Image (cartoon, rainbow, N blue to C red):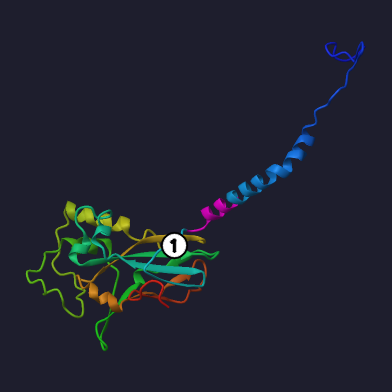
């Protein structure tokens, strides 16, 4: 007799019934119960993957979006914001304003931002306007270490002077601040497709923060990489509170 000798086919007076286990049948029976959990897990995984591929949302004081590009600007008006990038000497205490800018590219093509052409446009009065260039890291170090004026009102001149004034010695303090300003600045002018670039731009307002009530950040040069095509300029109203039309 063939088969397993430990499992006889017939025992005297007892009928033996063979039962075969079918794993596919058990899985088929279980599918209706576990299908919702599997579907939910797949949705969660897809959402996580999509979120990982997207640049983070922008939280800014003012922004402008068009042609797949969003430019935001957030003036740092709180002295505590400067403590992390400038733990020892703050350029804010010397009258330098940092504006945190974010360039978010939601298009399918990389773009290049002309950082050197960005301007902070100020309206001094109805007939007088002034545009400030962004400061280099070297200029930030110079301004941070420049001697304080004896007359506290002497720096309040219109228009804001753009000359370098008295040079600071390029010692270890100067080098330290220069590196700090460089590290906290905009790291690159190229913004890849579906990514964002964030950093600080510096402007020497000489402490005249009230000028921001009429300020605009003008970004005239954003070009599509590899093409002779540029986006329409961005002009961000820094005097407008968030959420206002």
- Dot 1 crowding, Cα within 10 Å, few <14, some 14–19, many 20+: some
Asked if residue 237 lies left or right of residue 227, the reply is left
Query: From which residue to which does the magenta span run?
Result: 46-55
The picture places residue 135, in percent across and down from the top left corner, at 27, 67
The picture places residue 61, in percent across and down from the top left corner, at 36, 68
- On whether residue 183 falls in the magenta region, the answer is no
The relative height of residue 96 versus residue 240 in the rendered view (above or below) is above
The picture places residue 39, in percent across and down from the top left corner, at 66, 48
Spot the residue most to the front: 13
Asked if residue 45 lies left or right of residue 92, the reply is right
Q: Residue shown at 28%/59% (left/top)?
A: 81
Quarter of the image with the C terminus in it: bottom left
Q: Residue shown at 30%/57% (left/top)?
A: 182
In-front residue for pair 7/125? 7
Q: Quadrant of residue 8?
A: top right
Q: Residue shown at 23%/66% (left/top)?
A: 96
Say how many tags the image has.
1
Q: Does dot 1 land on a helix, a strand or a loop?
A: strand
Q: Residue shown at 53%/65% (left/top)?
A: 109
In-front residue for pair 33/207? 33
Which residue is identified by label 1?
Answer: 190
């Amino acid at each position: 007799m063939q088969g397993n000798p430990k499992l006889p086919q017939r025992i005297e007076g007892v009928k033996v019934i063979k039962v075969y286990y079918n794993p596919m049948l058990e899985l088929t029976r279980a599918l209706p119960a576990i299908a919702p959990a599997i579907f939910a897990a797949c949705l969660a995984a897809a959402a996580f993957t999509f979120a990982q591929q997207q640049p983070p949302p922008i939280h800014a004081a003012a922004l402008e979006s068009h042609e797949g590009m969003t430019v935001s600007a957030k003036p740092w008006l709180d002295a505590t914001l400067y403590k992390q990038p400038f733990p020892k000497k703050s350029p804010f205490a010397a009258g330098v304003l940092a504006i945190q800018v974010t360039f978010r590219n939601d298009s399918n093509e990389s773009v290049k931002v002309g950082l050197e052409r960005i301007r902070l446009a100020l309206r001094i009065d109805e007939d007088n306007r002034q545009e400030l260039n962004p400061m280099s890291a070297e200029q930030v170090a110079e301004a941070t270490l420049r001697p304080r004026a004896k007359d506290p009102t002497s720096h309040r001149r219109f228009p804001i002077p753009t000359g370098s004034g008295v040079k600071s010695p390029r010692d270890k303090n100067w080098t330290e601040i220069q590196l700090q300003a460089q590290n906290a600045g905009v790291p690159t002018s190229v913004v890849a497709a579906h990514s964002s670039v964030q950093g600080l731009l510096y402007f020497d307002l000489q402490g005249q923060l009230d000028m921001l009530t009429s300020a605009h950040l003008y970004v005239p040069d954003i070009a599509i990489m590899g093409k002779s095509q540029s986006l329409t300029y961005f002009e961000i109203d820094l005097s407008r509170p968030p959420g206002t039309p």
